[in-house]
Image: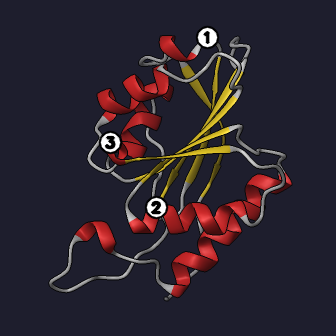
Amino acid sequence: MGGMAAERRLIIMRHAKAGELPGGPDFERALRPRGRRNAQSAGAWLASRSLTPELVLCSKARRARQTWQYVSEELSGEPEVIMDERLYDADVGDLLGIFAHTQASVNTLMYVGHNPAAAEVAEVLTVGPVEFPTSAVAVIGVAGPWPELAGGSGELIAHWTPHEEGG
């Protein structure tokens, strides 16, 4: 870890592939079959690395809630899950502020939300670009307490993207 001893892990996940909802609200877009498969694969990847969060902060948008549903089916344990409407339109500053209020007892926090914020928060914390297509997962090691999350305070320790074509 480049000299940084990670005490905590932040798992950032962009929602899985959603379909269009012509004439309907973006908030209600549902996952496509490919999105459901990719979310399950992401959950299996997390499970294979024993990366089960203690707390999940999930956007209230339908596609994010469904993504967490499919991910969680692959994980052991029952983390606390907070569906937070603020995560739908959050930017990097908003996310860091929300993450800062995480209890000190939480060692692994997971965010399930949207781009561009997901990619941007990963980039800000790790000071490097991170590929973030739908369903992507970045695991960031954090050395300090949650309120001290800031630019350069994390290190990318694992990353997953779906490699499925079509859909």
Q: Is residue 163 visible in the rendered structure shown here?
A: no
Quadrant in which the N terminus is drawn:
top right
- Disc 3 vs disc 2: which is toward the camera? 3
Gap between marks 3 and 2, in whole Å?
13 Å
Q: Amino acid at mark 1?
A: Gly
Q: Which residue is mark 2?
A: 64
Q: Position of residue 135 (x, y in %)?
A: 53, 63
* Of residues 132 and 111, the one drawn nearer to the viewer in this rendering: 111
Which residue occupies 20% across, 80% down? Answer: 24
At mark 2, the secondary structure is helix
Q: Amino acid at mark 2?
A: Ala
Please tell me in which quadrant of the rendered image residue 117 appears.
Answer: top left
- Disc 1 vs disc 2: which is toward the camera? 2
Gap between marks 1 and 3, in whole Å?
24 Å
Q: Amino acid at mark 3?
A: Arg
Gap between marks 1 and 2, in whole Å?
28 Å
The answer to whether 42 is drawn above or below residue 116 in the figure is below
The answer to whether 8 is drawn above or below residue 118 in the figure is above
Residue 86 relative to residue 143: left or right = left
Q: Residues within 10 Å of mark 2 (few under 14, many from 20)?
A: many
- Disc 1 vs disc 3: which is toward the camera? 3
At mark 3, the secondary structure is helix
Label 3 or label 2, whichever comes before in sequence order: 2
Q: Which residue is mark 3?
A: 86
Which residue occupies 47% across, 83% down? Answer: 32
Q: Which residue is mark 1?
A: 144
Q: Residues within 10 Å of mark 3 (few under 14, many from 20)?
A: some
